[in-house]
Image (tube, rainbow, N blue to C red):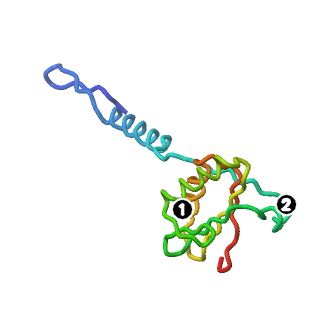
């Protein structure tokens, strides 16, 4: 492959094809190597043993309803009221456990958002409990 060719007038012609090939390969490399997604993880502590009813006994039960609402002890709340309630629970007892019980058909992202709200209030003992329909 000859890159430099002589023209009749004595001036050399430079072929841009190899340069374009290199730039294209670099572009593809950086597109595949870079990631613009923010990855976050939630720590879920699981054990090989089945979770007993005694481990969630005395915990605050937050029910995530299929219609988008939240319940604590039968009282309907919105997201802001949940954050305030969890902050007051954390003030009284920071070791208090919280059980999140999603109804059947609740999107996982909604459950994760509720768990993040609970942990942001200062409570670290958050568990997911299977609901009656889930």
Provide residue 30's location: percent of width, then percent of height. 45, 38
Q: Which residue is mark 2?
A: 48
- Distance, label 2 to label 1, CA atoms, is 25 Å
Query: What residue sits 50% from the left and 41% below the top?
Result: 33
Closest to the observer, 43 or 69: 69
- Quarter that holds the C terminus: bottom right
Horizontal side, residue 119 vs residue 16: left or right: right
Mark 2 or mark 1: name the one nearer the start of the chain: 2
Residue furthest out toward the right: 49
In which quadrant is the N terminus drawn? top left
In the picture, measured across the screen, residue 54 lies left or right of residue 41, that is right
Q: Residue furthest front?
A: 92
Quarter where residue 97 is shown = bottom right
Above or below residue 24? Residue 6 is: above
In the rendered image, residue 20, in percent from the top left (x then y), is placed at 33, 36
Circle 2/circle 1 CB separation < 8 Å: no
- Classify residue 10 as left or right of residue 130: left
Q: Quadrant of residue 24?
A: top left
| Residue extending farthest left | 9
Q: Secondary structure at mark 1?
A: helix
Q: Residue sitting at 50 percent across and 46 percent down?
A: 38
The numbered disc on residue 109 is 1
Q: Nearer the viewer, residue 112 or 64?
A: 64
Callout 2: SS: loop
Dot 2 alpha-carbon crowd within 10 angstroms: few under 14, some 14 to 19, many 20 or more: few
Percent of width and height locating residue 77: 51, 65
In the displayed structure, 96 sits above or below 12; it is below
Res 114 quadrant in image: bottom right
């Amino acid at each position: 492959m000859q890159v430099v060719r002589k023209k009749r007038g004595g001036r050399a012609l430079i072929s841009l094809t190899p340069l374009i090939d290199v730039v294209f390969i670099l572009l593809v490399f950086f597109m595949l190597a870079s990631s613009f997604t923010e990855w976050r993880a939630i720590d879920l502590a699981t054990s090989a043993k089945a979770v007993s009813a005694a481990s969630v006994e005395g915990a605050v039960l937050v029910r995530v309803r299929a219609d988008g609402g939240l319940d604590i002890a039968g009282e309907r709340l919105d997201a802001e009221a949940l954050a305030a309630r969890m902050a007051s629970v954390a003030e009284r007892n920071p070791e208090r456990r919280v059980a999140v019980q999603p109804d059947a058909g609740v999107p996982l992202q909604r459950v994760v958002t509720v768990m993040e709200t609970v942990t942001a209030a200062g409570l670290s003992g958050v568990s997911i409990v299977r609901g009656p329909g889930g």
